[in-house]
Structure formats: C-alpha cells, structure tokens
Image: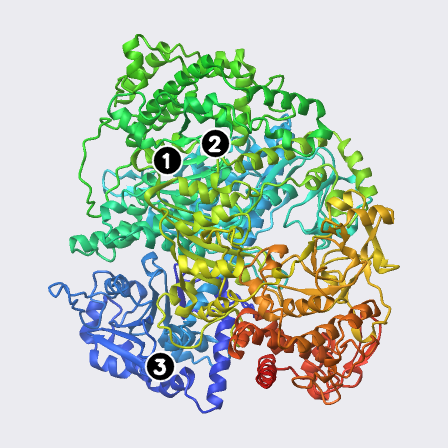
Amino acid sequence: MISDAIIVGEEWISEHYFTTSSTKQSFQARVIERRKAWDADAKDGIETPKTRFSAVRGELSKEFSTLAEQTDAAAVDVALDGVDAERLREKIYRPLLHALGFDRGGLTATASGPLTVVAPADIEDASAVAVIEGAPAATLEDLFAKDGATLLEPFVPDDDENHPVTSVARLLSRVFLHEAPPTYALVCAGRWMLLAERTRWPEGRYLAIDIQLVVDRNDTKRGGELDTALACIDADSLLPQPDGTVWWDDVLDESVAHTVGVSKDLREGVRRSIEIIGNEVVERRQAQGREPLPQDQAQVLAQQALRYLYRILFLLYAESSPELDVLPVGDAEYDEGYGLSRFRELVQVELTHAGKDRTHFYDSLATLFELVDQGHTARHDDASGDAQGLTFNSLKADLFEPRATALIDEVGLGDGALQRVLGYLLLSREQRGRERGFISYAELGINQLGAVYEGLMSYTGFFAETDLYEVAKAGDDSKGSWVVATDKADDIHPDNFVKTENPITGEEVSVLHKQGSFVYRLAGRERQQSASYYTPEVLTKFVVSQALEELLDQDGHTTTAAEILDLTVCEPALGSGAFAIEATRQLAAEYLTRRQNETGERIDPDAYPQELQRVKASIALHQVHGVDLNATAVELAEISLWLDTMVAGLQAPWFGLRLRRGNSLIGARRAVYSRDEVFTKSWLKDVPRPVPMAELAENLRNERIAGKTAGRIHHFLLPALGWGSAVEAKEAKQLAPEALAALKVWQKSVRTKPTKKQIDRLVGLSFRVERLWQFALRRREIAEKQARRDIDLWRDPRETIQDAAGPRSVTRHEIERELGDPDGACQRLRRVMDAWNALWFWPLTTTLTGEATPPTLDEWLDGLTEILGEHHEASTRERRAAAHGQVTFSLPTEWYALGDAEKEELIYANAKSIAEIKRERPWVAAAERIANDHGFFHWELDFSTVFARRDGFDLQVGNPPWVRPRSDVDALLAEGDPWWQLAVKPTQSQVAEMREKTLAIDGVRETVLDGTTDIAVTAAFVGDPIAYPHLAGLQPDLYRCFMEQTWRNASGQGTIGLIHPETHFTDEKAGVLRAAAYERLRRHWQFINELQLFEIDHHVSYGVHVYSAASAVAFENAANLYHPDTVQSSQKHNGEGPESGIKNTEGKWDLRAHNSRITTVTDETLQTWHALLEGDDVPVRQSRMVYAVNRSTANVLAKLAEAPRLGDLGLEFSSGWHEKNDRTKGYFDVGWGPVESWNDAILQGPHLFVATPFYKSPNESMKHNQDWTAVDLEALEPDALPVTAYKPAKSPAEYDAAYTHWGDDRVPARDHYRIAWRNMAANTGERTLIPAIIPPGAAHVDGLFSLGIPAETVGTLVAASGFMSSLVNDFAIRVAPKSTIRAGAASRLSFVHDCMLRDELALRALRLACVTDVFSSLWEEAFDSRFQKVDWAARPLPDTVGLGEVGSGWDESVPLRRDIDRRQAQLEIDAIVALMLGLTADELCTIYRTQFAVLYGYDRNSYFYDANGRLVPNQVLKEWRKKGDAIADEDRKATHPGSGVEYTYELPFLTLDREADMRQAYAHFERILQERS
C-alpha cells in the first residue's frame, strides 16, 4: 500500500497501478528500480536524491516544527501574516529543491517572482518544469483556493501588469496555457508539495505529498514512503534525460498501458456480462412463466444487453468527470444513495441464495437511469430558500429510452447476475495471488472504451437448441470459436475444447452451453472477415495531426477560427469513432488558439476547459460525419462522441443526420451516360461522367430541374454488367445449379441494347431523379438548420444570419419521420439506388427474395416509373426548354410547405404509393430486404448538403478494414462441423467425405451458398472498373477501395489521413493506383508493428498516408518506423549524429530521431526507383516504392539501380505445384516421411535456407508451419534424401506432364538444377531472400519459387546463386517489401556476368550448396582447376582446411559442414558481391547494420560458436549463462534433434563480429582485384 502522506487527486494516475504490489508493471516496481540505481550511485560515491535528502532532513524537521507553530489552521492569507517568507525560502524550499536536484549543473533556471522555470541546458526544445513557491497551506483545500492569496508573493504577468496573479491554482492554469508550456509543475506550499501535469491539471487531477510527514517518519526501507516521495518529485523524474525520455512520462504511459491492459480485461468482462444478462433474461422468463424468446430475438437481446452495460459505463465516466454536471457527484445524498461507487464494496459481498434472486441492484440502477434521462429538480424550502434533495439535468438520450432495453426490463435482473456484471465493470480481473483493484474510469479514456466494444462488433448471440461444447484450434477462442453438439464431440481432440475455470473447484473445464441458454460468441468466419483492428490513441492523434498540418495554413493563407467552424469532417469506416473524436479535439483546440490570436484576448485559464468542451460539442454536432456497416458500432460511436464532448447544460446530442449505418464502398453516385453511350452499349464498360452535387444545388437556386444531366441517363437507372454477380461464386455450380442457370439467363437478357423508346423513358426518369434529388437536398438543408444546437462559443466570429427556414420549430421526431417516409422524395430516390445495388447482390437462395424473380428491363423501367413518377412535357417549346435544362420550378424553404409541395409533385408525376408497388412487384420488396441486409450507402444523397456546398469533405480520417473479400469455405462449413477448422492436414479423400456429410446438415448448404455469393458479389462490385477505375485488373482489397472513395469524396482543398496497408506500393499490377497515390500523397510514414501498437502480429507493416488533391509528385517519406514520436522528432532534428536504422546497438528497435530518416520523394526519386525495380514498359510514375531506412541506404540503392540484372540471362521460372489447387486435383497428397528418390521429393519453404538445400525437415505431427526440425549437416549422409510432408499421388507420367515445362520444346524443369527460394517474404526476419540450389528430380509447392538458366552453363547458375544469396541482393528485395518474391523480383536482382572474382564466388557457392552426392554432377561440371588456387579471406579456425583444397570429383570433403566455415564462406560472398557492384565496405556494413536487424541481433546475442566452430544450442547456452566457464562437462553436451548425435561443445563460447569480418574480406578481395588489374 502507498502511504497516507501521498495523495492521488482525482485519479492523477491509475489507482490500481499506483497501489498494486506487483513486481512487474506497477508504480512500486518503478520506485524500487530508482532506489536500486540510487544505491549503486551512492556506492560509487555519486550524490543521489536520497543522500542529499538525508543530509538536510534534520534541519528540515526542525523548520517544519517551527512553521507549524507559526501557521494558523485558518485561511491561508491569514496564516501568511505570521510567516517569514524569506526564512521559508532559505530554510525549507531551497534545501528541499537542492535535495531534489533542481540546482544541479546542466540546468537553466529562469525566475519571475514565485515562478521559476527549470530546463536542461544542453537539450534543444526540451520540456521544462515550473517550480512555484506557495504560501504555507494547512490543507489542500486551502492550497486550491482560486481567489486566495496562496502564492508566497504575487506573480506579475508580462502581458498584464495591472492584474497580478495571487493564487497557485490560477498560476498553474496560466503556466500550462503558455505558448511553450512546461509539462510538469512542482508547487512548494509549506508542508505540502504538489505535482501537476499539463493535461491532467485542467481535469482536477494532481499528486500531493505531505513532505513534513515524510520528513518526520523517515521511512528508509527499500520502496518505502521516502523512496516513493523522492521518486515522485526528484528533478530527474520530471526533466528530460540526455536521450530525451522523462521518467514520469514513461510512468504515466505505463499507467495508461496498464489501464489498456485493464481495458482488455474489461472487454472480456463486457463479453461475459452480455452472456450473463442474456442467460438471466432467459431464466427469469422461464421462472415467470413467459414464452421463451424466438431465435431471431437472440441478437436483439445481445444488443440490448450491450446497451444496458453502456448505460452503466456512461455513468461511470460521468462520475469520473464531475465538472460536466451530468450527475450530482460529491453530494452526500447522491454518493450514498445513488452513486455507482457504492457498488464497489457491495460487489465483493457474498450473497445468500435468496439474495441472488432479489432485484435491489436492478431497481436502484433503474431509478438512476430514469433520473438521468428525465431529470429531477430539487425542491426549495419556502422558509429558508435552500434546495432540498438532488438535481439531475435531463439528458433525453436514446441510450436511456425504455425501448433500448425492453427485453431486459420486461423481467428485470437478479442481484446475483448483476453483482457479477458490476464486478466485471468495477474491478480489475481476478488473478491468483493478486488483489483486485478498482478500474479507473478517469484514466481509462474514451479511446479505451472504444477498444472495449470495437472488439465485440463481430460477436453474435443465439439460443442453444441443444447442449453445445465450444471448440477452437488449441482451445484458443481469441480468433473465433465454433460450437458442436455434445453427442457429436467424441472425435474432437481434448486440446481443442475451449476451457473455463469452474468457480467452485477452480478446475479448468470445457465450456458447455446448455440447451435453451443464451450464447454470445465470436464466430470464426466473422473474425476472419471483419479485419477490425482498434486503433491505439497514439496513432489516432498522429494521423489527425498530420492531416491537419496539410489542411490548415496552406499557400500563405492562415486559416481563421471562423474557417475552422466551417470545415466538414468524416470518418468513413467509423468503428468506435476514435478518429472522429480526435479530429473534434484537435479542431476545437485550433479554434480557441486562433480565436485568441485574432482577438488579442486570452481565455481565463480556469474557464479554458469549459470553453474547449463547448467548441468540441459544437464541432461534433454540426461538422462531424461517419459511416459504418455495423449499426451497433454507429450507436456506440455516438455514445463515445457524446461522452467526449459533454458540456454542462447540454442535453443529449442527436447525431442521426451525420452518423449513419451503411456500406461506405457500395452504393450509387451522381454520374451519367449520354444517349449514344447507352445506344451503343458502351455504358456496360465505360466509366460514367460524374456531375458534381454543386451543379444540382445551382440548378435548385436557379429554379431549373436539370442542367448538365439534361438528356443524359444516371448510371443507376441502367442495368449493370455486374448484376447477378452471384453467378461468380465457385460453390454455386454444385450447390444451386438450377438457380445459377436461371440467374445467368436473366443476366444475359437485361444486357441487351435498349430500344429508342426505352432510352426515351430512361431520359425522362433521369429528369425525375434530378427533381427528387432537389427535394431531398432542400429537405436536408432545412433539417440540419432545424436540428442545430445553440452553443455559446468563446468570441464566436460568425455573423448572425437570418435562418432561411424560420424559427426552429421542427422536432427531431418530425425530421426522422419525414426523412424516413417511404413515400417521400428522399426515400423514393434511395429505393431506386438501393434496387440497382440489390440486383448486383440478387441471391441464389430464397432467404431474402422469397418467390420473387429479378425484373426484366421493361419491368425494371415500369417499377422505376411507379417509384419516381413520370416526367411530363406539355409542349414542343417546353420539351426544348427541358432538353436545355430550362424548365423552372422553385421549392419552398419552409419545412411544412416543402412537404406540401412534395406531395403535389408526386401526385402530378403519377407516382404510386410504395406499399402498393411492393405488393404488385415482388422484386421491389425483395430488393428492399437485400438493401436492408447489405446497407448500401449513397454518399451524395445521404450527405447531400456536404457535396452540394463544396463537393466533399475537408478532412477525412480513419483506419479502414484491412481485408480482401475472399470466401473461406472451410470456415463456413465449420458452422456445421468444426472439423473443418480443427483437422490437421487431412487427405483429399477425407476432405471429400466430410464435405458430403457436412453439406447434408440442415442449413449448412444455404450458409455456404449465401456466404460465398455475398463475398463473390462484394468482390465483383469493388473490383468493377466502373465503380473504382484506379483498381481495374487488381485483386479487390477494401483498403484500396477506401483510398479511391476518400479521394472521390474530398473537397477541392480537402485532406485525407488514413492508416492502411500498402501492398499497392509493391504490387506489380497496381501501377495505375500507385501513380494516383504518388500524385495525391503529401506525407507517407511506413510503420512495422514491432511495438505492437496494434493488437496484431508484430511483423505486420502498415502506413500513415496523408492525401490531398492530385498535383506534382512531392511528399515526405520515411520507412521502417515503430512509433509516431520518431517522425515528429525527426522533423525537428538538426542532422547531427549517426543515422538511425532498424535496431540500435543494444538490439532494440531503433526509435531514435534523425532528419535523414525523412526524405522528399519527387519524380527524380521515382526515376531511381524505376531503374532499380522496373522495366522500360512501366511508366516512371508507376514505379514500385523502395523503403530505405535512411539516406545512406538510399545512396546504395542509387548504385544498385545502375547495375546489370539477373534477368538478362534468359531465365526460366517455376511456381511449382499450387499447394491447395493441385492437391485438390490429386497430383499429390499428404504423406509424411523420407522420399524414395529425388523424383518423389516435393519441397516446401522450410526445407531450404540461404545457400543451404538441407535446412529443416517436417515433423511427423505436422501441426503447423513451425513444426519442423533442423537438419544436422555434420551428420548428413552422402546419399541423404529429404523428409517431406507431401508425396506424388498420380502416375509418374501424369505427375511429370503436369509439372512445369520450359520453352517451346517443353523441356521439363525438373530435369535441371535450379535455384529455389522461399516465396513468402519475411521482410523483417533474419533474411528475406532465402535461395538455395535444388537438384534435378525435385519438385516444390508454391511456398517456393524457382528459376533455371537452361541456355547457360551450370557455372552461370552457380554464380547466380552466389549473387542471389548475398546480403546486397537480399537488401534490394527487402527495401521493396512484398508478401511474396516471384519471377519479376528475381529478374531485377543485380548480377555481374563477367565477374573478375567469379572463381572466388563460384567455389564458395558450390561448397555451400553441394552437401550430398545428388550435387556431384553440378560440382564436376562447374569445377575449374583455378579453384585450387583460391583460399579463404580469413580462415575461421586454425584447423580449417584451405578453401581450394578440393578435387574435381565430388566426395564428402567438398561440402562445408561446420557452422563457422559456412558463415565465413557466406560473408565472403557478401563482400565479393558488394565489391563487384561498386559498393564500399562502409556501405556493405551499413546495409547489414541498419537493414538486417534480426541477423545483427543474433550475431551479437544468440550465435555463439564453440572452439570447434559449432553453433552452441540454446540448452547449453542457458546453462553457460548461469554458470559461465565453470559449466560442467555434462551440461556442455546436447543431442542434435535432427540426427540424434550427441555433441560436446568446447569452451570458449564466442560471438563473432560480422562487420569486422566483412571488412577484412572486402579488403582481401580488393587487393586481389588490384593485383589482377
């Protein structure tokens, strides 16, 4: 426990983190760490805070006693009368500050009255600490008095000498709002020392220490009160260290990380709570004799349970922010009778059996919910005039409406269930041996709340129809799980059952869902398709700030505060709304900063937080837009946005006009075709011409129906080539052959050329579209004005404009009713757009369509006419006017008048009622159901006012899904039988048998068919060049679609900040998209997830991309980043010091800033990239990207760009067997074991390593891709054959004929020696390009790729293998990272054919490759007598045989077998290749040091060689690290798992310096070249 002398005010730091006694992630652990460092320094005679404090403690104790006698416990200003201020400074403050190190060397101190700003003297732009001298305060309440004389002397501001500051509180607020504010402030106030931090102080959060109590107690034990106090306020804790880090920054970050860890626990707690509430409702319904809920209500119940929980979470946040005035926090009556904090103790009280059924908790919460929603006014005593009771300000929030939790409120919740739920929400996770702490909702920010529910978006609820076990691979349900009936679970391996702890026995038991129970789980297929990754706050802040830097203050114009309030913001993949919230925060701060500068006034520091909150509320309500396909995500994003912008006096906001449910990528837009394009059928393939919404708004102002669209046809009125794309589903032919045939017939029929009469009808319908769109625009304009909230902003610069819509008399209910009216103009137009999209998604099952069939072209046109109405042309003159867009008709600007005009318009146009149309035309009703299911979104209709005003959004930010729409049939089949996810490498006969059985299960056929067709159609739509022209010919990838969609949706000056993958930069086929991206990019920062900012694999890379309108190529660029701070610091760096790389010299990821990290990419840069990576047929602007970590590596790339290419040799390639498709076709199958001959060998990636054809063998268990064992080269037999996991399954003739053949003569690839390499690129691994020579006869799957050079000698192949194995060519691959390395990448590698060191290169390559007699013919054919004159650049060991001491025939002495010899040969190849390509030794070493971080780390920390040149295995190293060279002989023995041979590893164990060895080798070969020249 932390001492009572240290007070954490308003959760300055996470309470659980601060008080836990954990020895790992805790405040106490950090304090003990400091104490150890102090003790070590003291031992060396170095002064420490502890030694300095001990020296002055005695005098301080006396002075504090004297001060206590002088100080009256009354008001502070009275106490000052009896206090000698100078004595206080000299005897208490200065000795204390000396002990804390504030007067040590290397610091600067700038004093102004009671304020001294202390900063490091030698760190540029370093954050400072404000030290404030206060008057002695008896209590903290006295110290915080805003208007009291709490400073030791008044502070006189330079800019306001007439108004001196007299209170500590006001000075702190002023200091933290300075243009260059300190991060921390330390206040001395008699016995109290107060620590404040810039962002926490406005929230009332602080740390206070009763230093007199600390002095008197003198608790000197390690980690005790004294250590803790000194660690809190020592100068070294508050000021930057030489590396720029600040101890308190790290501690607070760790506290937040600890809280984020708590948020992960909370996410699991919320998930469990939903299941608890769901099952409580089920059980209480049964107990009350009610009918069980039907299956279709299970997901409704899940959503209502989530809402119920978010009511509680909302109030927990409101209680942690009393300044928002949502709850009467602090009032004893509230805290004791209503507050949620009172439940903290109650949830840990054991209830009786009867008590569990009572509803005390539920009833209490229901009362609180009602008070919050409806409000309550305190009664006033007529006699005294005092308020009696509590006041609750009414919020009127959707979250608290009774319908939001109707299923729960119907039966209530028992105390037993709610106690468990509240335990999850209020307490940290229960762990053995550790106490549960209270969750800090002040520290657990809104962003972490988003993480909680964003992780639940893919979960679904259902009622178990039989007893079910939950299963997942290895029992890990984090990536999804499946359920299986208990009577069908016998064949499932015990390891695959998901386990839970029995609450009574503590034993791990299988999760069992009883029949009728409520189940809430993450379906495996949902997790695979969602690709929803919560974005950490550090990245949301960075992305938004980077985008704003490109949006504001451009082209010499300073953005005004008024312009800030006019910007439109959108998060197109809303999720939890993290980016919308961050944009709101940053724009609000920008507004206040700019408005203060414009007016020359300064906001009262104490009023600043409230003023900021008002601006945030205004921006969130009126400027922020967002879209998400998940309706619950939208609902909960609204709650997050509300929580973050709540301000006293503001009722619950309504975001319904701007936060919408929908599919951002699939919809219709305002784009048209000409009559000729329709007549010639070119509309089926050509991109329609977009017509800006501003043109429609102009038509509306000028009272005309159409302008640029007149006589043209909107694209969504015409059949699309993609209608009926369900036919593309691979499973359709087998599962629904009749439906497939019928859909194909319909597809063909609607693609016919329209007749002239049909084209005339389409033109008329386009006029109707324009007219209804005008009504929709006007309706939305008025709705937005009527829904606007009056929020008093500080010095609002906007002029008061007469509201064109008149007084705000239209209610939210009326707005929702009119905008949602199916017979209104907006919904009619939406229905047409929806129907056009629905016909893309017309299914092969009847789940959504019933008996309806898709319409013929005439039925389509008839239906559109009934929905939109007829376009009337009364005369020839009017017909001509219409053709030129001159028909006039004004629209009212008043809400109710507009409604009347709309009805008259539809009557005049003979539009039919929608209900009647749906009855008469079943396809219309079916299209509605399909649209509701898929959520099509039409940007220019749903956000028509944004596009009408400025053609799009000014700021778009977000993290769109990282997923390709691909069908996972196995995951769909697993919904019927989990075998499909749990089986390990089944044979094809097993697969066929199980498929037939699974499809026979009720409902599985429809699940597979619907699942695969939905994906197929989505892929067809987002891959359609008409919808996404820049993506033509590419594999559809949703993030790429979001790129193009946001470009399309941007205003003329708009900027876009997105986090997304960047495979388009290295995808050879993505040249068009890449060129468009280069022209729009303004900033590009590529990150690798090694710090796991995202909760995904640490190897994953992604980029932060800031785009704006297309222009000349010029963008800032940096690669191989791990944290955003590196970018921001590098932008300010002066260029001095060594360049940073991938890892630093300590083997940690290199976070150091350096201005060489950032380069500016121009067309000239693209020329270099083009020379390095592309052929002449590729335009320069379509060049793939090169990822150089700094300028030095960029210079190396420029040299490599000039080198000749391996592709000049006439290469032939083979991708081998397709591991899935060719196995399905029966060419090979699973079959573990040694092969009988190389003709039966089917190699996989792990079989090979760099220049090593025998590297690993698969284990018989074949559990996963790491279930392999290393080969022992020393024990490898001369005639050894590989162990493989696959074996040929066809006859030799069929097998041979189907494998790769080369050239016109159909030469079998397997007749040749080839260079094979791992196809999958480990871009951040030890090596990326991993090639080795493989012998004739061997085949491989597509986990390898191979090349041959049949037109050249084997000597050329050997030389090519040497070049390919080099670090230099590996570097060339990894700086243009891709997921795979195929023919194109290999062809672009550097290769010098007439190499002056060819013999030296070839001999080393051959001795590495020829490890068994299968390579004897390669050795003998490539052998040259000159080899015998070649020697090592440096012999690895004294007993190493000369490199050239070999004969012309292969024998067992040819292969290099010892680890140390193979290492030396390979690094000498690296030196040779570098020299041949014109690189210096320095450049080679820079490549190694900065680009091959893992290898660099292994060389320094893992690769120890014994006296015999063997790599020491980990089990021996582990013992040696414990015991040193005193290790016992027995401990130096280890059995090689690949051979069973026991080796004794001889001391000494040493690491080797690759950099020094490469320099030595380089010098050796440089001398040889000089001699030969």
Task: Determine the residue positioned at 34% across, 76% down.
Answer: 123
Q: Earlier in the sequence, mark 1 or mark 3?
A: 3
Q: Which mark is residue 654?
A: 1
Residue 1257 location, x and y as percent?
Answer: 78, 63
Q: Which mark is residue 1129?
A: none
Mark 1 is surrounded, within 10 Å at the Cα level, by few (under 14), some (14 to 19) or many (20 or more) other residues, namely: some
Where is the C terminus found, in terms of image quarters? bottom right
Q: Is residue 14 visible?
A: no
Q: Is residue 1353 left or right of residue 47?
A: right
Tell me the amino acid under the disc marked 3. Answer: Gly
Q: Are marks 2 and 3 in contact (CB under 8 Å)?
A: no
Q: Nearer the viewer, mark 2 or mark 1?
A: 2
Q: Residue furthest bottom?
A: 45
Tell me the amino acid under the disc marked 2. Answer: Asp
Q: Quadrant of residue 623?
A: top left
- Secondary structure beneath dot 2 equals loop
Q: Name above or below for residue 963 compared with residue 744.
A: below
Q: Nearer the viewer, mark 2 or mark 3?
A: 2
Q: Are marks 1 and 3 in contact (CB under 8 Å)?
A: no
The residue beneath circle 2 is 686
Q: Quadrant of residue 811?
A: top left
Residue 323 location, x and y as percent?
Answer: 33, 50
Mark 2 is surrounded, within 10 Å at the Cα level, by few (under 14), some (14 to 19) or many (20 or more) other residues, namely: few
Mark 3 is surrounded, within 10 Å at the Cα level, by few (under 14), some (14 to 19) or many (20 or more) other residues, namely: many
Depth order, front residue of 814/1048: 1048
Q: Name above or below for residue 484 compared with residue 1528.
A: above
